[in-house]
Each structure stands twice: as structure tokens, then as C-alpha cells.
Amino acid sequence: MEFAFTPEQEAFRRAVVAFCRREIEPIAARCDERGEYPLHLFPTMGRLGYLGVKFPVEYGGAGEGNVTYAILAEELGRASAGIALGVYVHVALALTAISVFGTPEQKERYLRPGIAGEKIGAWSFAEASAGSDPASIVTRAEKVDGGYRISGTKLFTTNGPFADFVVLTASTLPGQGIKGLSLLIVDRDTPGFTVARRIETMGMRAAQTAELCFDGCVVPREALLGEEHRGAAAAMQTLTLGRITAAAYALGAGRAALEATLAHVTQRQQFGQPVGKFQGVQWMLADMATALEASRLLTYQAAWLADRGLPHIKEASMAKLFATETATRVAGDALQLHGGYGYVMESPIQRLYRDVKLFEIGEGTSQIHRNIIARQLGL
Ligand SMILES: Cc1cc2nc3c(=O)[nH]c(=O)nc-3n(C[C@H](O)[C@H](O)[C@H](O)COP(=O)(O)OP(=O)(O)OC[C@H]3O[C@@H](n4cnc5c(N)ncnc54)[C@H](O)[C@@H]3O)c2cc1C
């Protein structure tokens, strides 16, 4: 068994850490306060090769695997979960789906500029009536001469306010549930496409989530991503890989909470000594560190399996479930150990606390992952 990263992966992590210190950490609080996404990071990350880490070299990627990509995700999550979320839907969902299921033309048109950070993607799956249950999707893609006419409203599309293109799930066979779903790529300038409203959220405020309307958007046949009526399977395959990224983000955010807390309890004095000297506090920190280590093992194991083409559905769900619930618990304990200082708005801990909860909801809720794991156990 091998638990070490390669020297190249260690060097990659050091480079990403330096990038996050320089470009993300200084603006994380401001982006959260103002609800602003730092769009300039897309071309910057594109130039550094970060957006294409796991994509084929022939489209401008680095051809690395999911383990290296998880290193990037962990460090982005540590620097700012909100900013990381925008990168997540672009790379882990929109570009991944196009990389796996796209035609060479679609890859030229979306993957190549997406890797360069010149075009930004979004992933539109959820609707008012369909979150956990894809069979309830009512957005319709009706076949018309030469293509499809799309009608429906998508709720909760992160990057929606500024995305250049959206990978969307729609029904091409109404009444057939998940057997009638297809994936389509819709360009922002398609007539009938509008951003209905931005959705205000309690956390992840740097990321921008919006309700999108598709009012009779006509797209050509070439907009179909993957096979017609096979969109549910393609979406699930994309989301399974995405879950490993979500786990890595949660691991990084949890680490940020632990690191800040270790610094705080060492410096904060009560009863004549640093609060970190109290055994009750030490035990909380020991539990936080242990749970994060278990998150790390589950996350990188799932990425390692995916890289080898081995079954990883159960492991991806276990990593996502455990790492995201751990992040929520660790952020809560971190806030508790900061006392009142953790609760004030200048504290980075309150932001982490608000941000990490979303990891348990997006990409399949914790309950849905327990269902997936149970099914994988044969239940
Ligand atoms: C900030 C934010 C950003 C988002 N970004 C995106 C995005 O970019 N693209 C996108 O497509 N979606 C996005 N989403 C949507 C997100 O993926 C969904 O909110 C999530 O999948 C849950 O769906 P729901 O909110 O409809 O909850 P529901 O499905 O209504 O679930 C409600 C509750 O019931 C539970 N439940 C449901 N079914 C079961 C079951 N079978 N067994 C046990 N419990 C069950 C759930 O676990 C949950 O606790 C975003 C959401 C938020 C808040």
C-alpha cells in the first residue's frame, strides 16, 4: 500500500498553496461580505493550468488524474469555500461532463476555452420541484426541425449570473422520468435564456447562484451532450466524480477551521493559561483532527480508485458524506473554541461555519448518499 503523494504532486500542492495565499485568501472575506465573485480568477487559473489539471492534454489540459485534482480542490476549499464553489461547478461538473461525453466539436467549443478560463460553465440540474429526485424534472427539450426547443425554469444554478454556457438536464421524453432525460449545452446568448434572479444564500456568498429561465430556447442538434434520453446516467457519472471534489473541498475547509482554532487556543489565555492547555479543549481538537484525517483517507482513496478505473460509486459517496458532515462538525467546534470571537463578523470562522453547511446539501444531500451507500451494500 502507498499513502504518499508523488514528489510532483507535493510540488503541485506547494504551488497551489502559494497561489491561494497570494490570490484568494486576501480577498475571501471581502468577496463574502459583498457577495462578489472574483471573475478574474478564471483566466488566471487557466493560465496556471489549474482548470485543466485532469483534462486531456490535446484540449489544453495537464492530463493528470483525480488525485492531483483533489489536491487542488482541497487547497481551494481551505482558502475560500465560496470562491471554490464557482470553480467547482465549472470544472467538476460542466467541463467534466463535456470532457467525458462531448463530441470533438463540443470539446473545441467549450472544453478548450473552459480550461483556459476564457469561457465559464454552469450546471443546471435542480428545479423547484426536483432536487434530490431527478425523475421530477419538468424542463422540457422538445425536438424541432434541426434541434430542440427548451422550456422551463432551473433553480439554484451556481455561476448562473455570469456563465457563458450551461449544461442543462431536460426531459426529451415527457412522462418517462429519468429514462427520458437528456443533457444539453445552452449558450448564454441563446434567445429566450434569461437570469430570472440571483438567490441570496446564508453562506457561500462569494459564489453566485441564480434561477434561470429557458423560454422556448431553440438550440441545434449539436447541443445534445451524450446520447439522447441517456442524460440521467451521464449526469450521475459526472456527479459521482464531482462528489470526490466536494469531499476534498470540505476537507480543505475543515482544515482551515482546525488550523485557525489551534492558533487561537494557543494564544487565548483564561484562568492564567492558554485555553489549549485545558484537557476538555484538547480532546475536542483531537477529535477534529482525527475526523479530518479520516476524511482525507476516504477522499483520496475514492480519487485513487477513479484514476484506476475501479468501481468508486460507494467510496465517492462515503467520502462526500463523511467529509462534509465532518466539515460541519469541525467548523461548529472551531466556532465554539473561538468563543465570542468566533461569532463576530470579522472572524473568518463565522464565514467557514456558514459556508460548509452547503457541502452537506449540494451534490446529493447526506440522506441521498446514505441511500446510495445502502444500495451499494445490496439493500
Ligand atoms: C447555494 C446552492 C447552490 C447550488 N448550486 C447548484 C447548481 O449549481 N446546480 C444544480 O443543479 N443545483 C444546485 N443546487 C441545488 C442542490 O443540489 C439541491 O438543493 C440539493 O440537491 C437538494 O435538493 P432540494 O434542495 O430540492 O432538497 P429536497 O430534495 O427537497 O430534499 C429535502 C430534504 O429531504 C431529504 N430527502 C429527499 N429525498 C430523500 C430520500 N429519498 N431519502 C431520505 N431523505 C430524502 C433531503 O435529504 C433533504 O433533507 C444548489 C443549492 C444551493 C443551496
Image (cartoon, helix red, strand yellow):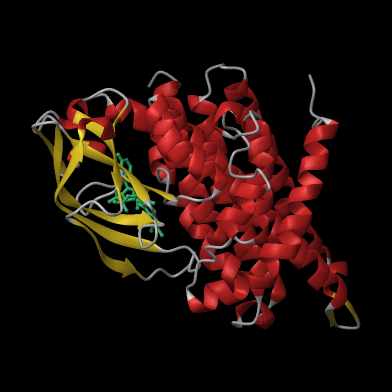
| Front residue of this view, candidates 100 and 135 | 100
Identify the image quadrant of residue 3.
top right
Give coordinates of residue 100: x percent, y percent. 45, 26
Residue 209 as seen in the image, left or right of residue 222: right
Relative side of 194 to 260, left or right: left
What residue do we see at 64% from left, 44% from top? 50
Choose between 99 and 92: the one closer to the eye. 99
**In terms of image quadrants, where is residue 72?**
top right
The quadrant the N terminus occupies is: top right
User: Could you tell me if residue 321 is visible in this image?
Assistant: no
- Would you place residue 62 above or below residue 293 in this image? above
Between 180 and 367, which is closer to the camera in this rendering?
180
Residue 300, compared with residue 277, is above or below; it is above
Which quadrant would the C terminus be assigned to in this image?
top left
Whether residue 338 is visible to the viewer of this picture, yes or no, is yes
Count all numbered tags in the image, as a single digit: 0
At 25% across and 38% down in the image, what residue appears? 134
- Residue 342 falls in which quadrant of the image? bottom right
The residue at 38%/32% (across/down) is 106
Single out the residue that lies furthest toward the right. 272
Instruction: Point out residue 188 in the picture as x, y percentages from the top left corner.
Output: 30, 53
Q: Is residue 170 left or right of residue 3?
A: left
